[in-house]
Each structure stands twice: as C-alpha cells, then as structure tokens.
C-alpha cells in the first residue's frame, strides 16, 4: 500500500470506531498533508488537515484545528511502501486507548484527532477554558500580572492553536474577556490576548521559561525594547507556560503608521513583494530589508547575551559526538550501499567534536520558522 491510500484508511477507521472526524466534519472530506516526519527508528508521522469537500480555500478552518495525526510503526514500513494492504487495514481490530487514540496493533497504526495526542497528554486540557478548569484561574492570574491590577476578573476565554508539533509541543493563543471588579461601566471591560506553549516534558517548560525571563530582564536593564515577550506564569502539572502577546489595535486595518501599525506574522512580513507589469510580468522584486535587519539584530543580541545556558542542558562536544555516531549507525543500517562512507564521515566529525574544550558556552538559536516571528511598531518579537 502507498501513503496516498492512507486518507481512505483513516475515513474507514473513524467510521468503524464510530468516532467523529475533527470538529464534527460530516460527509465527503479532503485530506491535505501539513506535516510529515520519517526518521530512522522514530516511525512515520503524518499530520493531515481535514476539510469538507465543498469548502473553499477561504472558508477552511486554520490548521491544526482540523488535524489528524497518523503514526506507522517501523516494522510496517519498507522504503516508500507500507507493508499492509487496504483490505487488511479495513479488517484490522481497533482499540481505543487513553486519551482517545485509535490503535490497530495488527498493522502497527495509530490515529489521533486534535487535540488528542498520546505523547502530549496535557494538550486537550490546555484547551479547557471553562471557569472550573485550572487553566481558567491561571489565565486570570496572568492577565492580572500583565495589567498590573488584581481587580481584573476573567469573564470568558477561548483558545486557538497556532503551531503544533505532534508529541512535542503546541503554541496556543488565548483570547480573554475581562471585567474590572471595582467598576460597572462599559469602559471597565476589555479584551486581552495571551500566548501559551505546552510541552511534552514539563521540566523543559520550566527551563525554557526561566531562560526566557532572564533574557527579557537583561534587555530591559539595557533600556532596549525586549524582543522576547514577558513570561506571565506557568502550570507545572500541564507543562504549560504563559506569556504576553503583542496586542493588535482596533484600527489595525487603517493605521497611521502603515504596515508597521499592523500586527504581522513573519510568514507575511518576510515575503518579497512582486511588482507586476502588463500581462503579469514581474517588473521588480521588493525585499523586506528592514524586517530582515530587525531579525538579524535580534539574533545578534541573543548570541552576545551574558545569560549563561543551563549547565544540565549544555550541548558539549562529547554529547554531540555521541549523537553523530548514533545517527550514523541508524543511517548505515538502512542504507547498506552508503554505510561505509557514512560511518567514515561520522567518525571524522565525532573525533573533531570530542576534542572541543570551549572556554565558555554561549546561547545560540535553533532553526526557526517565519511563523514564529511577529512584527509591530518597528520591532520584531
């Protein structure tokens, strides 16, 4: 069977288990691949965005609200092929495992509809914004810290997923309706947006938030506009951190400062603008130079920060050499023709890493996507 056949398998499995598709989609639907990961020893993970067949591009719900994650075990994978037939998939016995994962052990397949995530079990709880939930109280406390006033009370909250990496983490946008307890006038009500980020490892959540707060305070002491958003709280049991968000103004669509008065994501802001002539011919490409300069400046501040990394999380040369050897071994096992060359190159790299003895360890950024950036008021966050 091919990966192209998976959507048909998923539709059948949900019908067989009498489980609803994400957000109650009924009838014919279409599956779009939004995320795919295939690493040696770590199974195949595919995340689909599911929409009604008749929906237009403009009316589709934002990913990951309509997402389904599929995990295929190593033993049912052979190169680009899947080692079971469509008939076997349709006849496979299904098990419903907490917190709502559909499993077909015979064919090594697991399916979960957002916000269910077997390896990120707190995810669904992070979307429970009812007034009785622990999240509701934490959001109210975070809003009071942000507004520097404990008299603000949370009336209602909604949660919207922003970015999601299965089994790892999810960024959530919380939209709050607040009321000031000491005033009854209409002006005593306001809205507020906060960001949350839930991690599979609660300890990682605490370490990341501590580092973020240290960097924020360093920039504040230097008299700079912080490019990191301020931490506002954490729910240790959930591995959820809360931070401030850039608050869009009500007149964003017609702002006096032009595009800099509008809250833009990096996905939009870093796209080059095309000027077209007659017949659609591209006459000029406008590079967003100011936005790129701001991003480079923020990274330079990070690399030159005097905040020291957590000693327990240092990526030493010896640790990195070990990882190189482990990855090379996995690659060599699955690619016999290139195994000797892979092992040789890995050994050369590992030998160089093992001898590294830096005088000090500094902060560095990992890979990040434009969607992780926000632009507003001549600043990047």
Image (cartoon, rainbow, N blue to C red):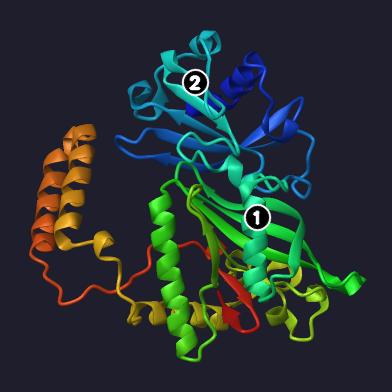
Q: Camera-side residue: 24 or 234?
A: 234
Judge whether residue 131 can be spotted in this image. Answer: yes
Q: Camera-side residue: 114 or 216?
A: 216
Q: Are marks 1 and 2 in contact (CB under 8 Å)?
A: no
Instruction: Find disc 1 in the rendering and name its residue.
Output: 137
Residue 153 lies, in percent from the top left, at: 75, 63
Q: Quadrant of residue 55?
A: top right
Q: Camera-side residue: 81 or 366?
A: 366
In the image, is 252 to the left or to the right of 316? right
* SS for dot 2: strand
Q: Residue furthest bottom?
A: 223
* SS for dot 1: helix
Residue 200 lies, in percent from the top left, at: 44, 46
Instruction: Find disc 2 in the rendering and name its residue.
Output: 103
Which comes before the other along the chain, label 1 or label 2?
2
Q: Camera-side residue: 314 or 178?
A: 178
User: What residue is shown at x 42% (from left), y 59% (from top)?
Assistant: 206
Residue 366 lies, in percent from the top left, at: 38, 63
Local crowd at mark 2 within 10 Å, few (<14), some, or many (≥20)?
A: many
Rounded to the nearest angstrom, the CA distance separating label 1 from label 2 is 35 Å
Local crowd at mark 1 within 10 Å, few (<14), some, or many (≥20)?
A: some
């Amino acid at each position: 069977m091919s990966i192209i056949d998976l959507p048909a398998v998923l539709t059948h499995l949900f019908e067989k288990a009498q489980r609803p598709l994400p957000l109650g989609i009924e009838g014919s639907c279409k599956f779009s691949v939004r995320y795919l990961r295939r690493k040696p020893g770590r199974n195949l993970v595919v995340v689909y965005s599911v929409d009604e067949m008749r929906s237009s591009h403009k009316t589709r719900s934002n990913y990951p609200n309509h997402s389904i994650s599929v995990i295929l075990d190593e033993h049912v994978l052979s190169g680009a092929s899947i080692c079971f037939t469509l008939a076997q998939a349709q006849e496979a016995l299904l098990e419903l495992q907490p917190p709502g994962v559909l499993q077909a052990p015979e064919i090594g397949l697991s399916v979960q509809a957002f916000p269910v995530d077997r390896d990120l079990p707190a995810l669904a709880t992070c979307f429970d914004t009812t007034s009785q939930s622990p999240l509701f109280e934490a959001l109210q406390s975070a809003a009071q810290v942000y507004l520097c006033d404990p008299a603000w009370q949370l009336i209602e909250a909604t949660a919207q997923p922003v970015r999601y990496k299965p089994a790892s983490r999810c960024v959530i946008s919380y939209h709050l309706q607040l009321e000031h307890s000491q005033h009854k006038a209409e002006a005593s009500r306001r809205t507020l947006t906060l960001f949350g980020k839930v991690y599979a490892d609660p300890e990682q959540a605490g370490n990341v938030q501590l580092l973020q707060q240290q960097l924020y305070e360093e920039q504040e002491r230097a008299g700079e506009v912080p490019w990191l958003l301020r931490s506002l709280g954490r729910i240790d049991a959930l591995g959820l951190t809360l931070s401030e968000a850039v608050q869009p103004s009500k007149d964003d669509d017609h702002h006096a400062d032009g595009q800099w008065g509008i809250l833009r994501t990096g996905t939009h802001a870093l796209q080059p603008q095309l000027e077209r002539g007659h017949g659609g011919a591209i006459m000029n490409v406008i590079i967003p130079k100011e936005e790129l300069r701001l991003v480079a400046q923020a990274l330079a501040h990070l690399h030159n920060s005097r905040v020291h990394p957590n000693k327990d999380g240092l990526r030493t040369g010896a640790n990195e050499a070990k990882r190189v050897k482990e990855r090379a071994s996995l690659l060599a096992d699955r690619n016999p023709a290139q195994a000797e060359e892979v092992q040789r190159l890995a050994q050369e790299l590992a030998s160089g890493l093992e001898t590294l003895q830096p005088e000090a360890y500094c902060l560095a950024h990992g890979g990040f996507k434009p969607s992780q950036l926000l632009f507003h008021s001549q600043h990047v966050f």
